């Protein structure tokens, strides 16, 4: 065996022994504690020194027994993998508070004579979000597929319609890099668009989010106190999570690489820091990821593959067309995932790349080919008929109207934020609706969607890179 492989193996064994010797019953999780995932281990680094699991983020502050950590799990990079959800279901026979009717089940009430159905949570890690259709929207919305019977429910008294949307828990970590809060941005109550107000507004937004999450997901009858909200937000904001180890390539911070959460905690950010259209006077650098550039000529083929994947992410040409929110253009993955070494959009630019379109109804051949690469969960499909505004006459079939459910505007149909790309290996499935079962499906989707013409080798390299984030 080559020397560097032996070194990597020794390091992995040391880590496993160390992990085994620490029991998780203690009230703190040490910084960089390795949680194993399918391609290595993920870890979280807190600027507070360790993760205090006795604070309000971990407390049941509502009526159904849930805490924030029910859905934002340290072992899953503060998200929730579908695999974990199913394991919890098996271990507790569905009695864990994760499986509460309110948003754990596909519909909050079961059909007469039937048990509650938790299939979307168990199979795809999806939480139901009931969103009201705004007053006087520019479109009419109807459900053309309604597999669970609660796609669109009209209140008999007020006439208000509520749509059932199913979304993945977005990780409660790396939050210092956000440009909007929630996939559709609905918790961005104070805008995250200016360096001067960023820190204060982010705290305002996250406190508001923590309040709504306690009242909603945890069904609290009294709101959390200001001190409890602050406690949750301080806890979250101190965290950075990323893949720490790779079974194939070893320590991701070895040999001058910058993988892992500790380096991530030193990465600078301000809104628009690397915007592709030069907001705030910045010059866009498409080489947004520089974690593994030193491995390009590593002697280890696994490390070289990760570095090549990073290069593809930064430089491979994409034909970007028919994306609501962007002009047609040629670009790279980093046109949208522009925040250096993090990967969300550094400005709040919600986009519709087509992840919620339905392969059965879609008429655009490129989008249809792309969504055909995904394992779309069984979800309602809405038909959105646009009647007013510049998109009048357009018809969209989608399982998630996105930002349009907040604004009522046709130009917002299907739009949501680009997600942070760290700690991916620990929290499959991917995209806000869990439509990509694994990172291979993500890459195959993009290969079709933006006509990348990737070779099999290039796909493997891109996947190796995404797994090392
Ligand atoms: C039942 C599961 C569940 C519980 C419990 C829960 N969340 Fe979430 N969380 C979600 C889902 C689902 C989303 C994404 C929703 C969306 O985008 O519309 C989310 C999103 C978030 C985000 C947004 C991250 C981003 O990048 O936009 C934060 C922050 C967050 N949750 C914090 C909390 C806090 C704090 C609590 C406890 C008060 C909590 N969550 C409880 C499921 C949950
Ligand atoms: C036109 C803008 C755009 C381009 C180009 C783009 N993305 Fe994305 N990306 C997004 C948006 C928007 C989302 C969120 C979509 C969703 O959740 O449905 C996303 C989500 C993702 C996710 C899922 C993250 C998660 O937590 O589930 C991955 C992985 C990803 N992109 C990788 C890539 C790769 C690799 C490329 C280049 C091959 C790329 N993206 C190119 C906009 C883009």
Image (cartoon, rainbow, N blue to C red):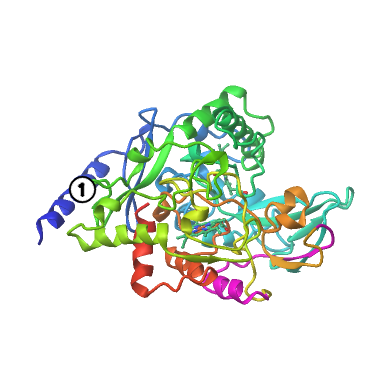
The residue range painted magenta reads 363-389
Q: Is 451 positioned to the left or the right of 461 in the image? A: right
Q: Is residue 94 above or below residue 346?
A: below
Percent position of residue 127, x then y: 60, 53
Q: Looking at the image, which residue is at 63% across and 65% down? A: 322
**Residue 340, picture quadrant:** top left
- Residue at the outermost top position: 227
Say which of 442 and 305 sits in front.
305
Residue linked to disc 1: 255
Quadrant the N terminus occupies: bottom left
Q: Position of residue 284 (x, y in %)?
A: 48, 48
Mark 1 lies on a secondary structure that is loop
Q: Residue at coordinates 47% horizontally, 46% vertically from top-left?
A: 339
Q: Which residue is situated farthest in the right direction here?
A: 157
Residue 14 magenta-drawn? no
Image location of residue 234, percent across then percent down: 50, 28
Viewer-side residue, 367 vs 184: 367
* Residue at (37% x, 51% y) in the render: 469
**In the foreground, 112 or 317:** 317
* Image spot of residue 233 (x, y percent): 53, 31
In this picture, is 110 found above or below 32?
A: below
Q: Going by the image, does 427 lie left or right of 295? A: right
Q: Is residue 93 visible?
A: no
Nearest the camera: 362 or 150? 362
Asked which quadrant contains residue 33, the reply is top left
Residue appearing at x 44%, y 64% in the figure: 438
């Amino acid at each position: 065996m080559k020397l560097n492989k032996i070194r990597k193996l020794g390091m992995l064994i040391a880590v496993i022994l160390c992990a085994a010797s620490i029991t998780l019953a203690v009230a703190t999780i040490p910084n960089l504690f390795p949680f194993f995932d399918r391609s290595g281990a993920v870890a979280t680094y807190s600027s507070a020194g360790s993760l205090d699991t006795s604070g309000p983020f971990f407390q049941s502050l509502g009526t159904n027994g849930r805490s924030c950590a029910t859905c934002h799990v340290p072992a899953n990079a503060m998200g929730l993998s579908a695999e974990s959800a199913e394991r919890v279901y098996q271990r507790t026979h569905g009695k864990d508070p994760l499986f509460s009717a309110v948003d754990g089940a596909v519909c909050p009430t079961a059909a007469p004579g039937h048990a509650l159905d938790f299939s979307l949570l168990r199979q795809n890690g999806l939480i139901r979000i009931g969103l009201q259709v705004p007053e006087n929207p520019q479109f009419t919305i109807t459900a053309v597929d309604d597999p669970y019977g609660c796609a669109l429910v009209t209140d008999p008294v007020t006439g208000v319609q509520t749509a059932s949307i199913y979304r993945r828990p977005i990780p409660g970590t790396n939050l210092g890099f956000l440009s909007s809060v929630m996939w559709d941005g609905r918790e961005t109550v104070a805008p995250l668009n200016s360096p001067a107000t960023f820190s204060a507004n982010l705290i305002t937004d996250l406190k508001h989010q923590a309040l709504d999450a306690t009242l909603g997901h945890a069904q609290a009858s009294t709101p959390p106190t200001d001190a409890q909200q602050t406690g949750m937000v301080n806890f979250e904001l101190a965290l950075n999570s990323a893949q720490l180890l790779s079974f194939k390539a070893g320590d991701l911070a070895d040999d001058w690489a910058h993988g892992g959460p500790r380096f991530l905690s030193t990465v600078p950010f301000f809104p628009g820091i690397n915007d592709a259209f030069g907001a705030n006077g910045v010059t866009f650098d498409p080489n947004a990821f520089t974690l593994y550039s030193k491995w390009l000529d590593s002697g280890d083929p696994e490390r070289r593959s990760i570095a090549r994947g990073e290069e593809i992410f930064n430089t491979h040409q994409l034909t970007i067309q028919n994306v609501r929110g962007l002009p047609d253009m040629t670009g790279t993955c980093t046109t949208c995932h522009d925040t250096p070494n993090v990967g969300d959009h550094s400005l709040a630019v919600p986009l519709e790349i087509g992840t919620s379109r339905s392969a059965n109804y879609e008429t655009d051949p490129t989008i249809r080919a792309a969504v055909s690469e995904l394992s779309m969960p069984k979800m309602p499909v809405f038909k959105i008929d646009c009647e007013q505004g510049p998109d009048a006459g357009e018809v969209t079939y989608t399982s998630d109207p996105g930002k349009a459910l907040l604004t009522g505007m046709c130009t917002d149909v299907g739009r949501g934020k680009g997600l942070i790309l760290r700690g991916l290996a620990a929290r499959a499935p991917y995209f806000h609706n869990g439509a990509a079962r694994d990172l291979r499906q993500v890459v195959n989707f993009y290969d079709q969607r933006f006509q990348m013409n990737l070779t099999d080798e290039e796909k493997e390299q891109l996947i190796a890179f995404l797994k090392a984030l």
